[in-house]
């Protein structure tokens, strides 16, 4: 079957599909492993092996022309300053520097501070009838941790978090390309630039200061400091992506564990099971189930050609449910033998903050279960979050 003859339909803007995409993802994997959507002008790959292969070939499949469908086309590497929109060799130069901010030692040193943040947000609800797990905790924890890491003043952190949420505002037909989202992006860029300028005048012991003082060796062997755009781009990405990924991970955790009370009870009784449970959550419900790449040369998948200059979407969420990779993939199982997943990417664009996200996920769930071993989700008041690249919950009221 050719890509244009498939009867299955999928697009990342359809909220009805996005509410429960699993059956359609299965059909894509079986009937149209290379899928073509003419309306929005993209190809899509849904099998684990294909998603991993695209991640492994960053010269054929570029990130510099956008990784979110509605933003794809123009060369973002020249304007955004964000490492997520860079390709080699510029990407490699900046990643080598940024990786030093996320060494295992630096991340592990944050464990006690993360627990303190959890206590701050969870303790007030002990003895209560319930609370909104996402709004009152899941979004607060990563935002606070990232803000602490960067050096955002405590009295400004909530305003920063609100603007991060607004960046992901979507509107029908245009997705995140709208004035509300743009306004929040501009505010964040201006805020971060002002913080970096302040650190140049008065350095502190935080990552904002480290960014303005850091030096890199470029492709020509010259030593230089980060440009304003590079520093602001990295900080912006860290604040936005670092907050959203963990918030969606914890949000899914609150819903999925409520649906699997026996496994939740096991986790409450034995915290040693939590690292594997976090990996299973990431496989089962990827916080970012769709990423985009720009194709640089004619490339064949499943007997069909994807022409150079095409937009290609890789379906991370579908890859995590691929029965070719995972036995009984639609079953959530904290005891599953972990074979690896692509929810944090793969290859040179593997998520820089993965270790921190895993730590926050593990500690966040552990501290939750220590206080609230049982809860029910109030689905009548729960609100989903839909964008072309992020999938999860923006509100999960729970009853204790």
Image (spheres, rainbow, N blue to C red):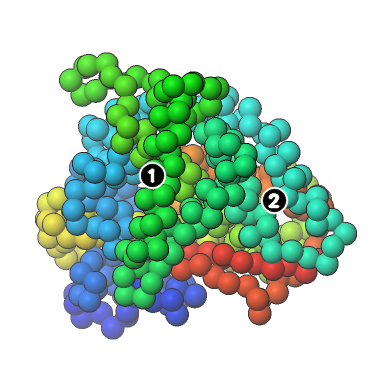
Dot 2, how many residues are within 10 Å of its Cα: few (below 14), some (14-19), or many (20+)? many
Specify whether residue 276 is in view.
no
Q: Left or right of 114: which side holds 15? A: left
Dot placed on the residue nearer the N-terminal end, 2 or 1: 1
207 or 23: which is nearer to us? 207
Query: Is 114 situated above or below 223?
Result: below
Residue drawn 54% across the image and 32% down it: 151
Dot 1, how many residues are within 10 Å of its Cα: few (below 14), some (14-19), or many (20+)? some
Residue drawn 52% across the image and 61% down it: 285
Q: Mark 2 near mark 1, Cβ–Cβ under 8 Å?
A: no
Q: Which mark is residue 395?
A: none
Query: Residue 246: x, y in percent?
Result: 56, 50
Quick one: which residue is furthest to the right in this view? 127
Query: Residue 32: x, y in percent?
Result: 29, 72
- Report the residue marked by disc 1: 189
Q: Which mark is residue 365?
A: 2
Residue drawn 77% across the image and 69% down it: 399
Rendering quarter of residue 77? top left
Residue drawn 58% across the image and 44% down it: 157
Q: In whole angstroms, how far apart are the C-alphas of marks 2 and 1? A: 32 Å
Query: Residue 185: x, y in percent?
Result: 39, 52
Specify whether residue 39 is in view.
yes
Query: Is 384 situated above or below 102?
Result: below
94 or 337: which is nearer to us? 94
Query: Residue 6: x, y in percent?
Result: 25, 79
Q: Left or right of 205: which side holds 260? A: right
Q: Left or right of 276: which side holds 45? A: left
Q: Judge depth for marks 2 and 1 and give the one in front.
A: 1
121 or 338: which is nearer to us? 121
Label 2, secondary structure: give it: helix
Label count reads 2
Label 1, secondary structure: give it: helix
């Amino acid at each position: 079957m050719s890509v244009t003859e498939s009867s299955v339909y999928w697009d990342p803007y359809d909220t009805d599909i996005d509410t429960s995409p699993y059956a359609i993802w299965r059909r894509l994997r079986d009937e149209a492993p290379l899928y073509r959507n003419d309306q929005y002008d993209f190809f899509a790959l849904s099998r684990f092996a294909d998603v991993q292969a695209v991640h492994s070939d960053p010269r054929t499949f570029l990130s510099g022309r956008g990784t979110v469908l509605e933003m794809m086309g123009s060369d973002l590497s020249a304007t955004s300053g964000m490492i997520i929109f860079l390709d080699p060799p510029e990407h490699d130069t900046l990643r080598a520097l940024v990786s030093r901010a996320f060494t295992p030692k630096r991340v592990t040193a944050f464990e006690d501070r993360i627990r303190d943040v959890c206590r701050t947000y969870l303790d007030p609800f002990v003895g209560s009838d319930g609370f909104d797990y996402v709004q009152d905790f899941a979004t607060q924890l990563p935002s606070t941790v990232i803000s602490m890491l960067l050096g955002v003043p405590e009295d400004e952190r909530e305003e920063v978090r609100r603007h991060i949420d607004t960046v992901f505002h979507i509107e029908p037909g245009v997705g995140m390309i709208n004035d509300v989202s743009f306004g929040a992006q501009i505010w964040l860029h201006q805020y971060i630039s002002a913080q970096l300028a302040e650190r140049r005048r008065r350095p502190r012991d935080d990552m904002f200061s480290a960014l303005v003082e850091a030096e890199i060796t470029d492709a020509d062997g010259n030593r230089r400091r980060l440009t304003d755009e590079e520093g602001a781009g990295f900080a912006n990405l860290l604040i936005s992506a670092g907050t959203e990924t963990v918030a969606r991970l914890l949000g899914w955790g609150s819903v999925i564990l409520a649906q699997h009370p026996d496994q939740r009870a096991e986790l409450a009784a034995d915290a040693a099971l939590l690292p594997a449970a976090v990996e299973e959550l990431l496989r089962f419900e990827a916080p970012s189930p769709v990423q985009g790449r720009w194709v640089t040369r004619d490339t064949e998948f499943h007997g069909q050609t994807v022409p150079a200059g095409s937009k290609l979407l890789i379906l991370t969420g579908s890859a995590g449910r691929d029965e070719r990779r995972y036995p009984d993939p639609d079953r959530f199982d904290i005891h599953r033998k972990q074979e690896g997943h692509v929810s944090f990417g793969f290859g040179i664009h593997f998520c820089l903050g993965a270790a921190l996200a895993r730590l926050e996920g593990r500690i966040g769930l552990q501290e939750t279960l220590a206080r609230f071993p049982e809860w029910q989700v109030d689905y009548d008041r729960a609100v989903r979050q839909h964008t072309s690249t992020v999938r999860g919950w923006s509100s999960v009221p729970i009853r204790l």
